[in-house]
Amino acid sequence: MRDFLIIGAGIAGLSAAARLATLGGVTVLEAEEAPGFHASGRSAALYEPNYGARATVALNRASGAELAEAGVLGPRGLMVVATETDADAFAADRRAMKLTELGPAEARARLPILAPAVTRAAITEAAQDIDTDLLLQGYARTARSHGAEIRTRAAVTAIARTAQGWRLETAAGPVEGRVIVNAAGAWADAVARMAGLAPLGIRAFRRSIAQLPAPGGRDVRGWPMVVGAGETWYAKPDAGNWLVSPADADPAEPHDAFADDMVVAEGLARYEAMVTEPVTRVLTSWAGLRSYAPDRTLVIGPDPHEPAFAWLAGQGGQGFQSAPAAARLLADRLAGRAPAFEPALVAALAPERLR
């Protein structure tokens, strides 16, 4: 009998395991062959503290120090660009992310492929790369050092209540525990239904990305991430290559997502309209699933109808940058201690807001 059974070994599940393993016995159950297979393995890998819903931004900011201490952050910067026709969206992005406006020459010094049509640009140096593999490995190592077990190829097939807690049937055999932590990402509502609980309306949305050669053979390593105003596309350096995403958010059933060629092509066309270098070749493309609650805010804490079933879900593509604070909040709530966050923030993230 374990104290905590965590379903899902993405960034949510592993960060929770690292925190909860100091409170009791932990078993993490992952359906795939390795942790971080789905959304966590296909992240844009950026820490931008001012991006997201208000409650998410609070978690992002509260996570920065721990991410820095873990040694997983590196300089990047984020630039939003626009034409005159996108002025309203540009102004909204500049305010929301606290960006500093740049003149055309300054913008092109940072990103030399900007097209003449780009007349507005603004930047933040607060945005940093996240070494997502290093962060996942660090959480797994910490969890195991406290006795946690991480089982892969252990898809949960049935959940039943017992006198002591829960019995889960998995592809790797049964396991019993006192508290379930639902960190199943796009599958979070399905896990709740399996446990006999009402879903929260968490839905999955596809996000695609294409890997291109560096534009014009340039050295892109020092370029910032660049986003079309209103998040109509974005691009980012990646190991000497150049990633471009159409920033799609198409509803999808939970599955091993793959890129839609037409969606990628449309996104690349929006990107090409803002740069001087045409897209001549796509090296590869892929997709992942972002999962959102109806209000686009994370869900953290015990279910109001079943305190032995806790939620850590709805990250919406911001799981890495919010993980340290989200895991701390979950641990506080499950330990029955006062969270180190304002009550209003705890309430904004609590599952009961969606019941």
Image (cartoon, rainbow, N blue to C red):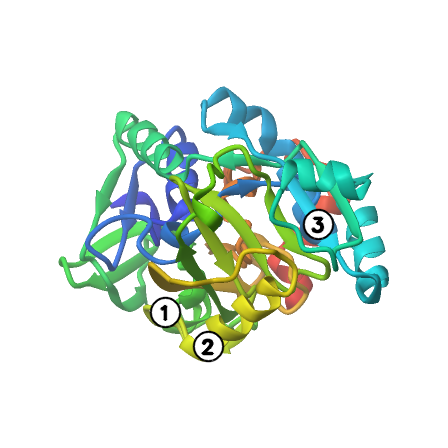
> Looking at the picture, does residue 269 appear above or below residue 231?
below
Quadrant (top left, top right, bottom left, bottom right) of the N terminus: top left
The amino acid marked with disc number 2 is: Ala
Q: Are marks 3 and 2 in contact (CB under 8 Å)?
A: no
- Mark 2 — residue? 252
Q: Residue furthest top?
A: 69
- Point 26% across, 61% down: residue: 168
Q: Where on the picture, by quarter, is residue 18?
A: top left
> Looking at the picture, does residue 309 appear above or below residue 186?
above
Mark 1 or 2, nearer chain start: 2
Q: How many marks?
A: 3
Instruction: Kindly report the distance in space between the C-alpha atoms of the residues bearing marks 3 and 2.
Output: 28 Å
**Judging from the image, what secondary structure is the residue with disc 2 in?**
strand
- Point 35% across, 30% down: residue: 138
**Judging from the image, what secondary structure is the residue with disc 1 in?**
loop
Q: Which residue is more in the foreground, 56 or 102?
A: 102
Q: Which residue is more in the foreground, 265 or 4?
A: 265
The amino acid marked with disc number 3 is: Val
- For label 1, the crowd category at 10 Å Cα-Cα, with few meaning under 14, some 14 to 19 and many 20 or more, is some
Q: Nearer the viewer, mark 1 or mark 3?
A: 3
- Mark 3 — residue? 80
Q: Position of residue 337 (x, y in %)?
A: 59, 33
Q: Are marks 1 and 2 in contact (CB under 8 Å)?
A: yes
- Point 13% across, 59% down: residue: 173
**Judging from the image, what secondary structure is the residue with disc 3 in?**
strand
Instruction: Kindly report the distance in space between the C-alpha atoms of the residues bearing marks 1 and 3.
Output: 27 Å
Q: Position of residue 349 (x, y in %)?
A: 65, 52
Q: Position of residue 346 (x, y in %)?
A: 68, 46
- For label 2, the crowd category at 10 Å Cα-Cα, with few meaning under 14, some 14 to 19 and many 20 or more, is some
- Mark 1 — residue? 257
- Left or right of 97 in this view: 288: left
Q: Residue furthest left?
A: 173
